[in-house]
Image: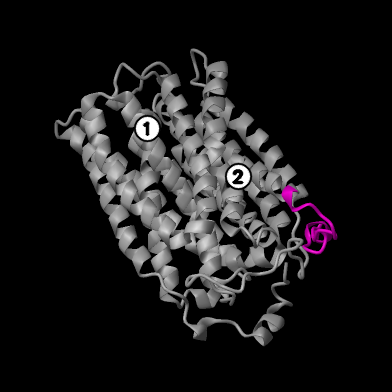
Amino acid sequence: MSGFFSKQRITAHSGFNRWLVPPAALSVHLCIGQAYAFSVFNEPLSRALGVTAATPEDWKLTDLGWIFSLAIACLGLSAAFAGKWLEKVGPRLTMFVAACCFGGGFWVAALGVHLHQIWLLYLGYGVIGGIGLGLGYVSPVSTLIKWFPDRRGMATGMAIMGFGGGAMVGAPLAVLLMDSFKSAASVGVAETFMVMGSVYFASMLIGSLTIRIPAADWKPAGWTPPQTKRKLISDKHVHIDQALKTPQFYFLWLVLCMNVSAGIGVLGQASVMIQEVFKGSVTPAAAAGFVGLLSLFNMGGRFFWSSISDFLGRQNTYFIFFVFGALLYASVPTMGARGSLPGFVLLYALIMTMYGGGFATIPAYLADIFGTRFVGGIHGRLLTAWSIAGVLGPVLVNYLREYQINNGVAKAEAYNTTMYIMAGLLLVGFLANILVRPVHERHHMRHDELDELDGAFPRD
């Protein structure tokens, strides 16, 4: 098995077409991106016992919200701890383990629904599935950066846009399956979890078997590294552990955390939110369509903005995210008060392009600052920002909503204060982005250090 999964086994031969690698990455990211569609399960799970209406013994939305938060928290933690391991064993084994965890997490969660034990949902989808999310997320990214040194932003966009598009497939698929399985005694969630876990495992397995890495001396035909570099693009390399000693890592950590916190809480409750703001006008099926639409713009923004960042620069691209994103969030309550459903949807669609673009641009930002040698491991550690944001964003949305409703605020207006807070978070990210500067040369690795480490971390 070790030989089958070894990096030597998946090193591409001379003349290999690098455009065969993005589909392998997408086959994984389109699966794990289903996490963005988990909100379509919240309302059915809140009446898992009552079926047609919630009973006192049924789970509350605030309890269910922790499933998504746990998954995102475990995503970041697993990516951080597995960073060095990924660099050592390569993407095939990492993606295979991700498939086992993500598919298996669905199956454990299905058992939790069947037994009505919420801790099994936390363990299954939240912890085990979250580990699968983290491993599946980081494994193709550094590989594509190495295949496309001429277009780092575009490469990360190709790798990560599938994660943003996962809900576009996952949301309607989940609704279709739940409608097929529901009965007088079941809302159909447990059966849906079993089917989706099986389908996602198979797709991710295919991705793990088809991924390839470039040879050590490979570069695109006719391409030579440019001699003139932007101020924030370095041709030096910083070790994974050394990156943690630089202020740049923590500024970028804050940049990602603020960008994610502002959007992830909305995604986690998107289905419920639009139904409450426009009560009676939006059906559950239409709300699932809204989740899918957000996924489409999330996915498109990942490729568009990361590709644009190759020309604008990563720092300038994030300035756009933070300034215009804050203005868009601050405008959401006005659209809700006016009852403008098209305006409400348009604002969130634009927000999602920049939210997704932030995810896709950050690996290229890291490669610019710290070099490409250990970008996979550094990216994994930076994703702890996603772990914090995965708790912070949904908690702000869910608990502020509940607090305001308990104090007499109408459900349609319960999200207004949260939107202004999200705009404030983006302004914090704006300040952190300003402070990003080139890494001091004392943190750069020498050539002899790189050669010495080749035994532990073979060059791709």
Q: Note whether residue 174 is visible.
A: yes
Q: Which mark is residue 86?
A: none
Name the residue at the left extreme: 408
Question: Looking at the image, do the residues carrying marks 2 and 1 touch, with CB atoms under 8 Å apart?
Answer: no
Give the residue pinned by disc 2. 29
Q: Which mark is residue 346?
A: 1
Relative to 31, say whether 14 is above or below: below
- Left or right of 386 in this view: 2: right
Judge the density around disc 2: few (<14), some (14-19), many (≥20) Cα neighbours within 10 Å: many
Q: Secondary structure at mark 1?
A: helix
State which quadrant residue 93 falls in: bottom right
Relative to 182, say whether 430 is above or below: below
What kind of secondary structure does the magenta stretch mostly adopt?
loop
Q: Secondary structure at mark 2?
A: helix
State which quadrant residue 110 falls in: top right
- Residue 271: x and y in percent read 40, 29
Quarter of the image with the C terminus in it: bottom right
- Left or right of 310 in this view: 432: left
Name the residue at the top extreme: 184
Q: Which residues are magenta?
A: 1-19
Q: Foreground: 387 or 193?
A: 387
- 6 drawn magenta: yes
- Residue 290: x and y in percent read 43, 28
- Left or right of 115 in this view: 29: right
- Residue 255: x and y in percent read 39, 60
Please name the residue shown 61% across and 50% down the image: 159
